[in-house]
Image (cartoon, rainbow, N blue to C red):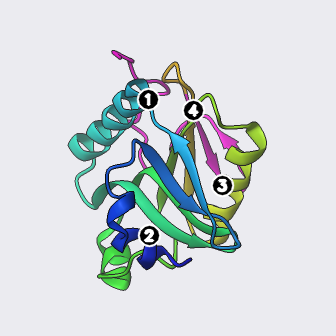
Amino acid sequence: MKWSDVCKDEQLHNLPYKIELNEWGNIVMSPASNRHGNIQSKIAFFLMTLMSEGTVLTECAVETSKGVKVADVVWASAEFLERNRGTTPYIEAPEICVEIRSPSNSDREMFEKKDLYFAKGTREYWLCDEEGRIVFYNHRGEMNGSGIYPKMPRSVEVDA
């Protein structure tokens, strides 16, 4: 199955799950919680209100060597958007890719996504846990904070 098939399939439009494709084109689904959505909106809000340039997207599809992965939140520069205008999934990863851990996610899965996004050109990967704590990574490893977005706090308050 291709990502364009997933996007066009009306039976998949209103599922309460995050959908991705694995390297064999099979659909992989992860249930989303209100807590997950709350954290996702808080991170997107921080990026949208404090960054002077670029665009914030939620549920951003990126074609990787292991299928289409969908980052919970991304920040993309104007240059990135110009290069990738009109494509779904993106063939390269935006500058910042954020994943929010769900109870069903393993460490292996989250670090594999990190590696896949870096292989597709992301400059930073942020991994947020269910308590709202964020760990920042660049291609060399863990950082004390974001180099692209230094005003980003190391945690967000969770309401849900």
Query: Is there a contact, CB below 8 Å, between mark 4 and mark 3?
Result: no
Residue position marked by numbered label 2 in the rendering: 6
SS under mark 3: helix
Q: Is residue 89 visible?
A: no
Residue position marked by numbered label 1 in the rendering: 33
Amino acid type of the residue tagged 4 in the rendering: Ser
Q: Earlier in the sequence, mark 4 or mark 3?
A: 4
Q: Residue at x 52, y 75 (%)?
A: 92
In the rendered structure, does residue 146 fall within the stretch colored magenta?
A: yes
CA separation in Å, label 3 and label 1: 20 Å
CA separation in Å, label 2 and label 1: 21 Å
In this view, the residue in front, 140 or 40, is 40
CA separation in Å, label 2 and label 3: 20 Å
Residue position marked by numbered label 4 in the rendering: 102
The picture places residue 34, in percent across and down from the top left corner, at 37, 26
Q: Nearer the viewer, mark 3 or mark 1?
A: 1
Query: Is there a contact, CB below 8 Å, between mark 2 and mark 1?
Result: no
Task: Look at the image and give the residue range highlighted in magenta.
Answer: 134-160
Query: Is there a contact, CB below 8 Å, between mark 3 and mark 1?
Result: no
The picture places residue 140, in percent across and down from the top left corner, at 73, 54
The image shows residue 155, relative to residue 37, as above or below, that is above
Q: Is residue 70 visible?
A: yes
In the rendered structure, does residue 8 fall within the stretch colored magenta?
A: no
